[in-house]
Amino acid sequence: MDEQLWFAMTIFFQDYLIIDCPGQIELYSHIPVMRTLVDALQQSGYRVCAVFMVDSQFILDSCKFISGSLMCLSAMIRLEIPHINVLTKLDVIKKSHRLKDIESFLDLEVHELVDRLDNETNNRYHKLNRAIGQLLEDYSLVGYIPLDISDQESISFLLAQIDNSIQYGEDVEPQDPNDQYFEEDEDADDGAFDNYNN
């Protein structure tokens, strides 16, 4: 691993690091570079989660939705770490009044998706459509979290999902708010005792 990157990671070991990776799917599906990086991070004690961003404008029809889902599945299987798929740019979709199209895909069963795909493709591809649908159903891993950057609740929900997947903050000792009160009270008592002795 690059020495500068390694040095930076040791400096920020206690912090929450976000590494923005290139978007080329080959890096996740064909070349082991991302898996090597993930393994190095885990061996260094980091808890790692992949957040796979898919442009919601890209999946507004069945063919593109299947394509995006297969890309997600490929990355999930290759990396073998907690994985969150995010549909981005929902704020743009809202402006174009196509939010219902996205919602229909989020609640869609695989067999319904295959039926839609059959209606959009030539008969000779129907067997392939069923095989792809079966693949997605067998793994049953691909789901999406919609993200609207103009909505604070949407951002908070996504962050909570990421925190949960890496158990962020779970090793921090819980603090009782009363502890601070009693510590301050003891300090005050000690000061009063010192004044009495003087």
Image: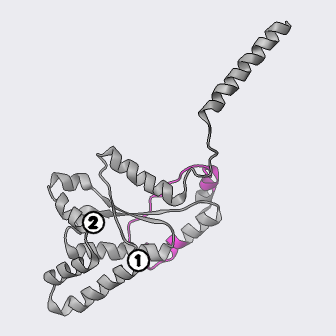
Q: Earlier in the sequence, mark 2 or mark 1?
A: 1
User: Is 179 in the magenta?
Assistant: no
Density class for disc 2 (Cα within 10 Å; few <14, some 14-19, many ≥20) is: some
Q: What stretch is highlighted in magenta?
A: 7-35
Q: Residue 74 carries which label?
A: 1
Query: From the viewer's perspective, is 40 left or right of 127?
Result: right
On-image quarter of the N terminus: bottom right
Q: What element carries label 2?
A: helix
Residue 121 horizontal/vertical position (percent): 16, 84
Q: Which of 177 and 158 is in front in this view?
A: 177
Q: Which residue is drawn at 44% across and 62% down?
A: 21
Residue 162 horizontal/vertical position (percent): 46, 57
Between tags 2 and 1, which lies in front? Answer: 2
Residue 90 horizontal/vertical position (percent): 25, 55
Query: From the viewer's perspective, is 112 left or right of 191?
Result: left
Q: Residue 176 carries which label?
A: none
Indicate the amino acid at tag 1: Ser
Quadrant in which residue 20 is drawn = bottom left
Q: Which residue is drawn at 40% across and 79% down?
A: 139
Residue 144 horizontal/vertical position (percent): 34, 64
Q: Which of 180 and 162 is in front in this view?
A: 180
Q: Which residue is drawn at 38% across and 82% down?
A: 138
Q: Which of 2 and 101 is in front in this view?
A: 101
Circle 2 residue: 106
Quadrant in which residue 46 is drawn = bottom right
Colour style of the rendered protein structure: one colour
